[in-house]
Amino acid sequence: QLVECGGGLVQAGGSLRLSCVGSGRTFGTYDMGWFRQTAGKEREFVAGISWNGPSYRDSVQGRFAVSRDNAKLTMYLQMNSLKPEDTGIYYCARKFLSGNAADTRRYDSWGQGTLVTVSS
């Protein structure tokens, strides 16, 4: 089970930190990802974290940072210099298949999402 929190309303240029709390002793053994979705659009990859390190979509590179604390069963997404186009529902997910981190089919467990709204 995954539970996200930390979303909210922020002005452009502001920051938010999202958290994703997991459960179970195997939390730390899985690669994890952050995705976002807006109305009428497909869910898109935002960031991922694996044993090889973090990965990001081009539009958030340098502004977002993904990290995890396995002892706390938590993954984080620090979002800085937010833009209106970052608005959406943000989901965390557990990756169970190796390969492309941006492929939603490689994830088997999803949180309920947390809404991020960036005003201009």
Image (spheres, helix red, strand yellow):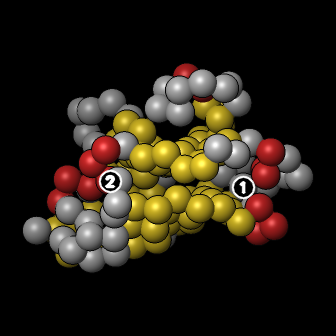
Q: Residue at x 68, y 25 (%)?
A: 97
Real-space Cα distance between discs 2 and 1? 24 Å
Q: Nearer the viewer, mark 2 or mark 1?
A: 2
Q: Decide if residue 108 is on the left or right side of residue 44.
A: right
Q: Residue at x 80, y 45 (%)?
A: 29
What residue is shown with label 2?
60
Residue 68, image x, y percentages: 65, 61
Q: Is residue 74 visible?
A: yes
Query: Tag 2, which secondary structure?
Result: helix
Sequence-earlier tag: 2 or 1: 1
Which x, y percent locates residue 79? Answer: 38, 66
- Residue at the (26%, 66%) spot, across then down: 82
Residue carrying label 1 = 22
Quadrant containing the C terminus in the rendered view: bottom left
Identity of the residue furthest to the right in this view? 25
Few, some or many C-alpha atoms within 10 Å of disc 1 (few <14, some 14-19, many ≥20)? many
**Residue 52 image point, x, y percent:** 64, 44
Q: Is residue 117 above or below residue 85?
A: below
Which SS class for mark 1? loop
In this view of the protein, which residue sits in the foreground, 85 or 29? Answer: 29
x and y percent of residue 2 in the render?
66, 51
Q: From where the camera sits, is residue 111 visible?
A: no
For the residue carrying disc 2, how many other residues have a C-alpha within 10 Å: few (<14), some (14-19), or many (20+)?
some
In the picture, measured across the screen, residue 80 lies left or right of residue 109, that is left
Instruction: Give the number of callouts.
Output: 2
Name the amino acid type tagged 2: Val
Residue type at numbered disc 1: Gly
Between 20 and 3, the one lying in front of the other is 20
Instruction: Reply above or below: 68 against 89.
Output: below
Q: Which mark is residue 109?
A: none
